[in-house]
Image (cartoon, helix red, strand yellow):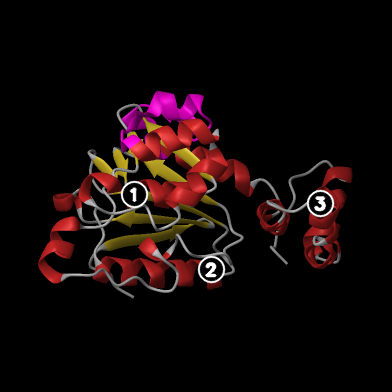
Amino acid sequence: MSYEFVQYEKQNHIATVTINRPEVRNAVHPAANEEMARVWDDFAADPDCWVAILTGAGDKAFSAGNDLKWTAQHGTVRLPKSGLGGLTARTDLDKPLIAAVNGFALGGGFELALACDIVIAAEHATFGLPEPRVGLVAAAGGIHRLPRHIPLKIAMGMMLTARPITATRAADLGLVNEVTTLADLMPTAQRWAETILECSPLSVQTTKHCALGGLGKSLPDAMGADGPMLMKLFTSADATEGPLAFAEKRKPNWKGV
């Protein structure tokens, strides 16, 4: 399947998704949203894809979010059911997502990064939700995800002033896992992905599902809801392979089932 506004590659259990509109700082418009939705649907359904890296084309922007020029010319933006970039409204994607932020991550671009599990940022990257400056609001999850990631007063300060922060500040706040040079950005994201691949993909997916599903629940309720996923894991081939490989002092041969 070919795409006009997204580059989609798969290799060695890793999918790389690149927003490919550098002429507008990788801002997304309805056609790009629909393409990205199809990409994430494919990634979710492909049993051979275990981790994804999301980035933007070029060296200036991860994504500037919603394409405001397109919106001004055409009116209200239409989003797929899975949200901005086909991602921000998804709750069914247990496979880990890594954002490789290669520049501006503003508005919807920041919301896409917030929807990922791990964020690697180039030194010159910036993060922010500037929507109030243009009469809008970070409605693709930003106004709810940001206060869940960092202290409320800091989140409110960022959102109400619409001021961006640097990659270093984002790392200090816990929004970014690692800051690196632009040249090392994708190799660093690849290294994180390959480290994840050392683990059982089913274990990783169970971990993400249970950890995120337990947010907002009491500890007993969260643990009580883990049963179905844990049963699937503990009766899997990977749950047999892991201890066997450990006992035999070899690398496990994960199947993801």
Q: In the picture provided, is 67 more to the left or to the right than 212?
A: left
- Relative to 105, say whether 228 is above or below: below
User: Can residue 40 be seen?
Assistant: yes
Instruction: Say which element carries label 2.
Output: helix
Give the residue drawn at x 32%, y 35%.
161
Instruction: Say which element carries label 1.
Output: helix
Report x, y in % for residue 15: 46, 57
Please, what is the three-letter code of the amino acid marked with disc 1? Gly
- Relative to 193, say whether 165 is above or below: above
Give the residue drawn at x 78%, y 64%.
229
Residue at numbered disc 2 = 44
Within the magenta stretch, is there residue 170? yes
Task: State which quarter of the image contains the C terminus.
Answer: bottom right
Q: How many marks?
A: 3
Residue at numbered disc 3 = 242
Q: Which is more foreground, mark 3 or mark 2?
A: 2
Nearest to the observer: residue 27 or residue 246: 27
Question: In the image, which residues are magenta?
Answer: 161-186
Q: In the picture provided, is 234 more to the left or to the right than 131?
A: right
Instruction: Say which element carries label 3.
Output: helix
Sequence-wise first label, 3 or 2: 2
Of all residues, the one furthest to the right in this rendering is: 247
